[in-house]
Amino acid sequence: MLILGIETSCDDTGIAIIKVSGKKRPIFKILSNVISSQIKVHQKYGGVVPNLAAREHLRNIEPCLKTAFSPRHLRAGQASKIKPEHIDLIAVTIGPGLIPSLLIGVHFAKTLAYKWQKPIVGVNHIEAHILANLLENKEIKFPAIALVVSGGHTQLILIKKIGDYKILGETRDDAAGECFDKVAKLLRLGYPGGPEIAAQAAKYKIRTTKYEIQLPRPMINHKNYDFSFSGLKTAVLYKVKDMKKINVPEMCYEVQQAIIDVLIEKTLRAAKEYKVRTIILSGGVAANEELRKQFKLKIGNCSCIRGARKLKIDFLVPPKILCTDNAAMIAVAGYFGAKRRPAQRDIKANANLRIGQ
Ligand code: KG4
Ligand code: ZN
């Protein structure tokens, strides 16, 4: 079966075509995955401007669709074979996200479904980030726990099976990615802030000068699974004001490490409490090399006791290109969504859509 995925929840316009095969369990293969980034448009504002994002989605979405079907872009062997009439399902992000952006994707998807006479399914963007892992033909052993860290969300989610989600904790203020972006703005680095901070932090490690800057690890010892990152951003602001000269690489190293320490500590604690077999890391911040490396290292030493058995905990993280927003992950989530609720007619954008409700 072929699924067309559409993603416009924030500032990336994404159109993808995936193929689903396999008898025992579905195997997902990306045939095309087009992403049109709006970084240049939002860069000068240091963050996403919703109405500008919607205007750009409107401008880019049709060219992205054409590219997705173009023989030059389609995966080798599929060239010129795939046409709109071969698509079996259209999957589109309905939330959470920015409403002006979401509306463009939802209306575009509905128009295509009407024009091509195809079924349509609405997808939760957070579920899609989690299921991006299946694109690598990986298997999730349940129960699993997912840490979704993006520009808009930081959530720790318990997964009993695909479709059965429970939010264990989430950020009370800024998301982890938002913290990266805001600190980068404060330090006058570029946008998006995550990759900029990571690049600066890597420079510090090479120089290994005296370690002067120390930042808090917010809520790390709280018993619940909630997070808070706005205080970290404020702590950086005070340091910047107090210090005559800022060592930017050192500051970035410490901010990144503070975020990583909190994320790993809380995820591992939840993994042990719920005796999970898999830890999933996903969302844009999961592209952070240090976060991936340190998670892998810590999980490598962990196991869970189930009954009389001691089991290794698997660690899943998508390749970096599939961590940030893309439509291939929307198509995968659409596959499962359509199985749960076939023939959807009431597709509506919902900026505050929550997973597991
Ligand atoms: O999932 P995503 O593409 O969009 C949302 O759904 O929000 O995530 C974007 C976020 C941005 O805040 C960006 O700074 C962050 O992911 N990000 C990173 C890295 N690459 C992207 N954060 C830390 N390190 C990175 N390498
Ligand atoms: Zn996202």
Image: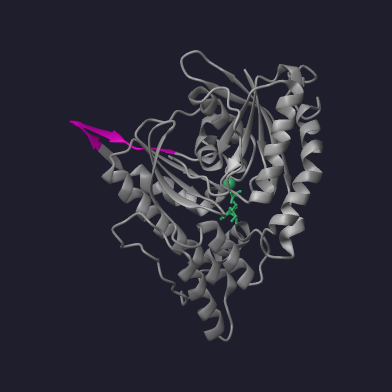
The image quarter containing residue 247 is: bottom right
Of residues 261 and 204, which is closer to you in this image?
261
Of residues 343 and 144, which is closer to you in this image?
343
268 relative to 202, above or below: above
Q: Residue furthest top?
A: 23
Residue 33 visible in this rendered orientation of the protein: no
Of residues 137 and 131, which is closer to you in this image?
131
Residue 171 lies left or right of residue 96; in this view the side is left
The image quarter containing residue 215 is: bottom left
Q: Measured from the top left, where is residue 25 in percent x and y? A: 47, 19
Q: Measured from the top left, where is residue 143 in percent x and y? A: 34, 34
Residue 145 lies left or right of residue 344; in this view the side is left
Residue 124 visible in this rendered orientation of the protein: yes
Q: Is residue 307 magenta?
A: yes
User: Considering the image in quadrants, where does the C terminus appear?
Assistant: top left
Number of numbered discs present?
0
Q: Which SS type dominates the magenta stretch?
A: strand
For the point 51% across and 22% down, which residue is it?
339
Q: Residue furthest left?
A: 308
User: Considering the image in quadrants, where does the N terminus appear?
Assistant: top right
Q: How is the image coloured?
A: one colour
For the point 35% across and 62% down, which residue is it?
220
9 relative to 73, above or below: below
Residue 174 lies left or right of residue 115; in this view the side is left
Q: Measured from the top left, where is residue 330 in percent x and y? A: 60, 35
46 relative to 87, above or below: below
Q: Measured from the top left, where is residue 257 in percent x and y? A: 46, 62
Residue 315 lies left or right of residue 308; in this view the side is right
> Magenta residues?
305-315
For the point 69% across and 56% down, which residue is it?
50
